[in-house]
Amino acid sequence: MKKLCGIAAVWVLLMLAAGAAAEVLITTADGNGADGGVSNDGNQGPSYVLGTATNVQLRRYDGTRAKAVLLRFDLSSVLGEDLSDAVLSITTTSTSNRERTINIYGLKDGEGENWEESTLCYNTAPGLLPANLGYISIDATQWTLLGTIRFAAGPTTNSATVDLSPLLAEDTNGLISLLLYSATSDSSQSWYCAMKEYAPTYPSPTLRFPHALPIGSSYPQPEDQSTVIDTYLPQLCWKNRLIDRYQVWFGAADANELDYQARLSPIAVVNLPDPNQRDVCVDIPSEMLPLAAPQVYTWAVEGYVYPAEDPQHLGEPNQLLTVSVWRFTTKSLPVVANNPADQYKFVGQSASFSAGFQSAAPVTGAVWYKVGTPDTPIDPQTPGVEVTIVDEGSGRYTVTLTLDAVQSADEGAYYCVAQNSSGLSDPTAAAYLILKRMLAHWAFDGDATDETGTYNGTLYGEPNFVVDGSRHALAFDGVNDYVQLPAGFENFRAGITVAMWVNPTTAGNYARFLDLGNGAPSDNIIFTRAGTTTWLHFESFNGTTSGGFVSLGSGTLTENNWQFFAVTVDENGQAVLYKNGFPIASSTIAKPNVVVRANNYIGATNWTSYALYNGLIDDLKIYNYGLSEDAIAQLYADVAGDYCRFRPDYDFNNNCLVDLADFAAVASQWLECGLYPESACP
């Protein structure tokens, strides 16, 4: 802690000046830093001292001029921080009109890093070997080439990212020394490099660490000079480094570093048993909420440490080390609290979307939009359209859009923007109105026309339309026969139902009844045989990842028999498989992505290694919602006729009905008695 106290004045000044700076600057003037030059030529010989010069020359003209710059940075105050992506900056001036590449060398850890600035010359500099005048000989066993920096022509500040990791990996004293020397020889004039002695006219050589935390508080939330629209802002937060106690001030004022104590109120004291704790937050007192808007608020964070004379921390951390002052401005724009939910309706039903907003000022208006190109505002004066705003209290408002007797033209995505005296809210997330309906129906009565008129199929290969008893069906040969469907099938947020009659001839490997998608895999919806087994399998993919499946095996699929199969997925992802009107398996799967599917097939697949379907398919239907169990039973009965969905308990003659015959069976045993003795029977 003594080391911290020794640099207290530096850090207080830095934080007051930098405010919310979220980086650390270390100059050659900080701590045990140093800078200077070395020369080994006829102009300034190897014993010429340049350690205390305000500016030093950098030049390489082999055999004539040899001048380099030596810098030392004291990083002891940031050790343990993320020191990656360090940036070296140095101010130069030159009469040359040419740029030059300058090598940056790093001195390996050792006693040489404590070189004496006041006597610095070529002969006393670490890691420089004796050389003829006009040359600088760098000892490669002591200096490591770290990178380069580009010196521009004319007066400027030059910067370059430096990888310090080779030095930091072996560092034991927190000192980093850098040597700057031209990469190539030329006759160009010298660059004059400003040393720390030239400050404040020119800045000292500097290392900037963009990922390191400065001592004290940084990274404020809300950010400095930001706009806050949540007038019930719960907390003030910041990043901490090496502070034992914080005192926090807050208030509705545009305060600064000089007057914050007079204009703000103390709201919290935070004691940190571990000064390395990174994240610190304090609650804004409830009596200060909601915040006024519009209003400038200031908060100040004082950082205290234990004084140097209390190394055992027996007293209180009462030495002020850092002060950060930050400001934000409130606006009373409405804030989205609840997004509208999807609506799944049949044609003719009413649909209502509701959005919640938090607003310090009354919500005086709201506009609902239908997503399109461009998005279209909904006119509340349109017949059958109503928009209401309800004040729920405590600054909460509910805005509702109601559409009466919805039709196909109403289908789409809707979002809301609310307004108060300060302006407009951000838009809510969009919610969909989906009209539940049959998307497609291929009866295969002599063609592949979709009876809804949307997804007419195109035949490939030579599939044949056949009559099999009372059925009109499409026959696939498993070689090159399939039906390709148009692009679409994009929105199944309300669920999906696929129903069909099939009569497989062979067990082709993963032979598809239906595959909707954009590739293999790419947002596929597949209804298929699993491998060459008798398993029936339904699966959907979100992108390339499976969203889940439902399947059942061991005899579910049989060859050369007509079977009715269906799968339903409701809006919650509950999936059910059906065979011949009976549910046979269930699971939960993710809703498919809302995306246009371009590669859509009956009898074929997006996977090139899988088999094409061999057999008959009839009466294939797709719905954009999950049908009920009763609806599936009706689809089956429409073709198969009446069937027994469940067996009544008292159906003794197995006709799926409790009738007089069943009563007669009971009556025939009326008063039959099994009591003993028989005299106990009536």
Image (cartoon, rainbow, N blue to C red):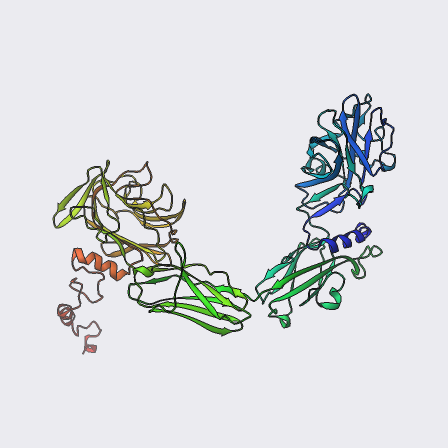
Q: Is residue 417 left or right of residue 647?
A: right
Q: Of residues 398 and 106, which is closer to you in this image? A: 398
User: Which residue shows up at 23% across the image and 56% down it?
Assistant: 581
Q: Give the x, y percent position of residue 500.
A: 23, 51
Q: How many marks?
A: 0
Q: Is residue 60 visible?
A: yes
Q: Picture coordinates of residue 478 (x, y %)?
A: 23, 38
Q: Which is more toward the observer, 62 or 608? A: 62
Question: Do we see residue 242 in this rendering?
Answer: no
Q: Along the line of sight, which residue is nearer the eye, 682 or 543? A: 543
Please name the residue shown 28% across and 38% down the image: 611
Residue 300 in the image: state x and y as whole percent: 71, 62
Residue 114: quadrant of the picture: top right
On screen, 593 above or below 302? above
Picture layout, residue 61 above or below residue 296: above
Q: On screen, 414 above or below 11?
A: below
Could you say which quadrant of the image residue 111 lies in?
top right
Depth check, front residue: 32 or 308: 32
On the image, the x and y values in percent for residue 170 come to 73, 36
Instruction: Name the residue located 72 percent from the left edge and 42 percent from the top edge.
Output: 207
Quadrant of the image containing the C terminus: bottom left
Residue 80 vs 191, above or below: the answer is below
Location of residue 360 (image quadrant): bottom right
